Image: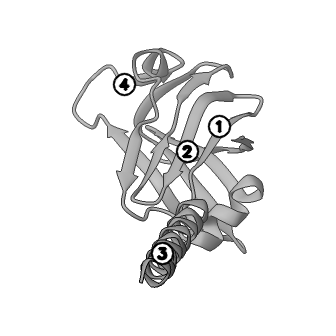
Amino acid sequence: MIKNRTKLISILLLITNLIFISTTVFYRSKIDNQVFKVYTFEGETNNIQLDNGVIIITPGKHIVNGGQIQYVGNKLGNIKFYSKTIYLDKQGGQDTILSNRVSDYTSVMKMTFPDELLLNRDIGEISSEKLLSDNDIKNIKDNLYFSLTCTPNDGKPINFIAKLNVKEIL
């Protein structure tokens, strides 16, 4: 009788351990499959410099902080409109991630670069549950761009485009 009881307890302990081990392995694999990535980016042309950009990818949220811009080109005056845009280049098309625009159609004294960008250096931030697709995340290192487009009083847009250098933080 004691021998049967010992066997029964041993079998119950074995079953309990198997359940515990299988549950632990299952949840461990779920945790390992969750993606948490952090990228930084910067870029420059002869006229603009962009730095301190950050992209954070977690299972429930994507965050893009555009960093800051500095205009280093020749002074541009009489600007009535400009936009700052971060986008993915997809086979020649643009998939906008973050964009903001500033216009001044009423002021006698129009905006000038670099003065305006000294006041508005921040490019902005956006977040969403799913801002970027899995394919976008795979291709982000080679296809992320920044565009500064401005329109002076003459109505002819000027566009500065910088390919962004994206690095994954491990």
State the CA–CA distance, disc 2 to disc 1.
Answer: 6 Å
Q: Could you tell which of marks 3 and 4 lies nearer the N-terminus?
A: 3
Which quarter of the rendered picture does the N terminus lie within?
bottom left
Q: Could you tell which of marks 3 and 1 lies nearer the N-terminus?
A: 3
Residue indicated by mark 1: 40
Cβ–Cβ under 8 Å for marks 3 and 2:
no
The structure residue drawn at horizontal position 50% and vertical position 60%, both measured from the top left corner, is 96
Cβ–Cβ under 8 Å for marks 2 and 4:
no
Occupied quadrant, residue 95: bottom right
Q: Residues within 10 Å of mark 3 (few under 14, many from 20)?
A: few
User: Residue 100 in the image: x percent, y percent?
Assistant: 39, 44
Residue indicated by mark 2: 55
Q: Could you tell which of marks 2 and 4 lies nearer the N-terminus?
A: 2
Residue indicated by mark 4: 110
- The nearer-to-camera label among 3 and 4 is 3
Which quarter of the rendered picture does the C terminus lie within?
top right
The structure residue drawn at horizontal position 36% and vertical position 61%, both measured from the top left corner, is 129
State the CA–CA distance, disc 2 to disc 4.
Answer: 34 Å
* Closer to the camera in the image, 144 or 27: 27
Cβ–Cβ under 8 Å for marks 2 and 1:
yes
Q: Residue furthest front?
A: 1
- The nearer-to-camera label among 2 and 4 is 2
Q: Label 1 is placed on what type of residue?
A: Thr
The answer to whether residue 92 is left or right of residue 154 is right
> Which type of secondary structure does the marked residue at label 4 adopt?
loop
Position of 58 relative to 49 (above/below): below
> Which type of secondary structure does the marked residue at label 1 adopt?
strand
Q: Label 3 is placed on what type of residue?
A: Thr
The answer to whether residue 57 is left or right of residue 51 is left
Q: Residues within 10 Å of mark 4 (few under 14, many from 20)?
A: some
Q: Could you tell which of marks 1 and 4 lies nearer the N-terminus?
A: 1
The structure residue drawn at horizontal position 59% and vertical position 68%, both measured from the top left corner, is 29
